[in-house]
Image (cartoon, grey):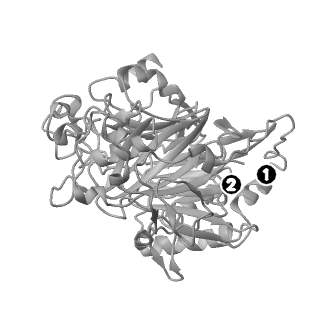
Amino acid sequence: MADQLAQLGSNVPGSIFAMQPFRNAQSLTGADGTSFTLTSMNPYVNSWFVLEIAQANGRARTVHFENADPDTWDISLIDEDGPALLIEGEGDSFACAPWDDGELDDVQSASLPFAPVCDWSLFVRNPVSGNRTTREAVAEFLRENVVFGDSIVNLIKGAFFEDAFMVSSEGEEELEEIDGVQLLGNARLDRAPNMRPYMGFELLGTDAGAMTAGAWYEVDEAPGIYASVMQPGMISSDVFQVPGANRLDGVESRADVYLVAFDMARFDIGYELGTDHPALGWSSRPSNRHGQGSGPDGFSRPDPLVRTGMLNPTFVERLAATFTGGFKRDHGAWRFGDYATFNYGHHYGFMQNGTIISRLWPNLATLYMTHDGEVSMRTWSEEDVDLLPDLVFARQNGVSIVENGVPGPRVTSWGGGNWSGSANADLRTLRGGACIREVEGRQFLIYAYFSTATPSAMARTFQAYDCDYAMLLDMNSQEHTYMALYVHDEDGEDMDVQHLVSGMAEADPRGNAGPLPRFISAPDNRDFFYLLRRQ
């Protein structure tokens, strides 16, 4: 492990495997000379595995497996009359060799981003491009297995382990019921008029659709999710007395901001890379390069890992919300200022399912989750390498907007903060951001949609809502700031998609039967976060 950590910490790691300090590999050779190597990318997370099958004649293939239930199933190689996968969990086990009966050939040639094998204990992650054929194949798969039929979860449960998913709540403390509206309180505003926002959510407690600025409202049939609206010009003068942000102009002062808060005691959060973005090559912005490969980590492709740009279908029944991730790679590095001159321009890093895809650099705002479910935002530091064994995912995006409750140190520096702007290079533009707020020991993740704003307007807004730490996500279009909630009926046979702003529905792909939920029913080229209701 020390050697593998040294590879990650080297000037240029050079490969996706070299980026994984905790990887563990097993190898076996069959009677015909075919060798099998199974690599667990991160045994702590137990989610992603790469199988390399190398024939004696030199031909080789790789398979990217995703564990259907990392908390239950352990995956390893065994010799069972030849190399096979051993699936173990809850006191049961079985061997599976999908390469022997043609199953692996079938699923790798399919159009499904997630193709089940080994009695649904594993998914093969297949490369997809999001074309129409793929969308229709995925939509049909989900209609048959998730939305309008027997759920995938039930299929998995019944496939092998009759009682493997039995959970006993005896002795567990029930989730403390809270009045989230009361706990969140009101934003610090000097005036709080009634507003009629163009918000696509169905809310409780409004006055015929009118919302008091700065107040929170519960989303109907979505416990633990709350919405608020305001304009930066309404913010209390006390907030503006805190130094660290520029004065707001007349346009952004009266521009609507929509906020959505999630009580994280009720939700798990995950992160999925898009099929294309963020990419792994060099951004065109920094001139500081090491000249040892096609990207800051020495490569520009994730091979043999496969990026699907889509939610794992086992999560659909629990899905509560999605929102887009961060900048594309080309915009995710510094062109100007001191951060452009070292660390090769500070390309924004990211990791998924315990697998580092692009290095996490110090100085950058980072949203991450650990094994124990802790969700946090912070400015990454050199010392945070000690957190790597605990990380499940991480996404970096620029620098802090709010840090310790006050504007981040680079909010007013256009080049120093890499804030970018619209296509016309205006600093004021449509932006999306997120913050973490803790209230009486209860953590809330807040997503905010700014119809037009500078970083200063974002900082003042997050201050007014008493955020502890806030960061930018993406900007310039409703496609890039996409956010949707999902309300399931009691039978779990239907799912209502509610977009934060109606125009975001235009980003949903179209199939033969009509619109398909973005990130859910079709692969997407952009990365995204998702929230699942805890079971």
User: How far is disc 1 from disc 2 in space, using C-alphas?
Assistant: 9 Å
- Residue type marked 1: Phe
Q: Where 336 sits versus 330, above or below?
A: above
The residue positioned 40% from the left and 49% from the top of the image is 190
Q: Which residue is drawn at 52% across and 26% down?
A: 389
Residue found at x 44% / y 72%: 502
Going by the image, does 48 lie left or right of 163? left
Q: Residue placed at 31% from the left, 60% from the top? A: 254
Q: Position of residue 480 (x, y in %)?
A: 35, 59
Q: In the image, residue 385 lies at what x, y percent? A: 42, 23
Crowd tier of the residue under label 1, counting other residues whose Cα lies within 10 Å: few below 14, some 14–19, many 20 or above: some
Residue 337 or residue 340, whichever sits in front: 337
Residue furthest to the right in view is 170
Closer to us: 462 or 527: 462
Type of the residue with mark 2: Trp
Earlier in the chain: of badge 1 and badge 2, it is: 2
- Residue 140 drawn at (x, y percent): 59, 74
Q: Quadrant of residue 93?
A: top right
Q: 450 or 349, which is in the foreground?
A: 450
Q: Describe the element under mark 2 as helix, strand or loop.
A: loop
Where residue 171 appears, as percent x and y from the top left, is 85, 34
Query: Is 415 on the left-hand or right-hand side of 499?
Result: left
- Which element type, helix, strand or loop, lies under badge 1? loop
Residue marked by disc 1: 160
Task: Give the residue number, with chain letter if any, for mark 2.
Answer: 120
Above or below residue 277? Residue 495 is below
The mark found on residue 29 in the picture is none
Labelled pair 1, 2 in contact (Cβ < 8 Å): yes
Position of 67 relative to 337 (above/below): below
Residue 103 visible? The answer is: yes
